[in-house]
Amino acid sequence: MVSIRLWLFRALVFSAAAVMLISAIIPWWTAKVEILANAPTGISYFEVSLYQHGIPDNFAREYFRHDITPLSQITLAWIYIGVSIVTILLSAFLKGKIGRWLLGITGLAYIIYAVVCIFMMTSRLSIYQIPLQGEVFVEGSAIKQTSFQVGYYLAYIAGLTCLFLALFRNRIIGKIKFNN
């Protein structure tokens, strides 16, 4: 019975790691921009997306060139995700408190990462007078819609799932009896 519960716990941990990976791959925030006046690139519409790793170089280059995330920061963000996922998966196989602590700290760190990301995004958007969510008119263009995306919410789900699993690991696995 214990082995079934142990594998159930590990499956839940693997699920949390998968959710974390998915949250890192898909956008956290988007802005749909329509160009109203003479577009220098000939493009009348583009979308800016913020991912876990930042804003990649795309059509936004002409309008938000100072906000494109450098390759070095993108690389560091992906290293962080890789280390976090390996730590989560490793914690499922470690016994005792170390496994619980690794899982809990990694989950909490990802929640803090998401919160810090949005605080930084808010400060950058305030320069352009763009809200995190909603519609706004900007000189020369109209931001049709800015909104959080599924990836952002999945970051919290992954982090909270890790915290939950760390807190309730012993209850999920049950007591292991050793026969002498």
Image (spheres, helix red, strand yellow):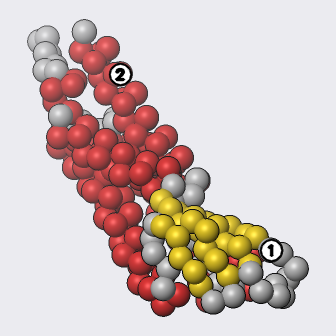
Residue at position x 13%, y 20% from top?
A: 175
Depth-wise, is mark 2 or mark 1 nearer the camera?
1
Q: Quadrant of residue 132?
A: bottom left
Q: Is any part of residue 80 visible from this angle?
A: yes
* Residue receiving disc 1: 44
Tag 1's secondary structure? loop
Report x, y in % for residue 161: 31, 41
Q: Quadrant of residue 48?
A: bottom right
Q: Residues within 10 Å of mark 1 (few under 14, many from 20)?
A: some
| Separation of residues labelled 2 and 1 (CA atoms) | 53 Å
Horizontally, is 86 left or right of 143 in the view? Answer: left
Residue at position x 31%, y 14% from top?
A: 4
Say if 72 sits above or below 12 in the image.
below
* Kind of residue indicated by mark 1: Ser
Residue at position x 44%, y 85% from top?
A: 126
Please state, as top left, top right, bottom left or bottom right, where the C terminus lies in the image. Answer: top left
* Residue receiving disc 2: 7
Exactly how many numbered labels are in the figure?
2
Q: Quadrant of residue 13?
A: top left
Q: Residues within 10 Å of mark 2 (few under 14, many from 20)?
A: some
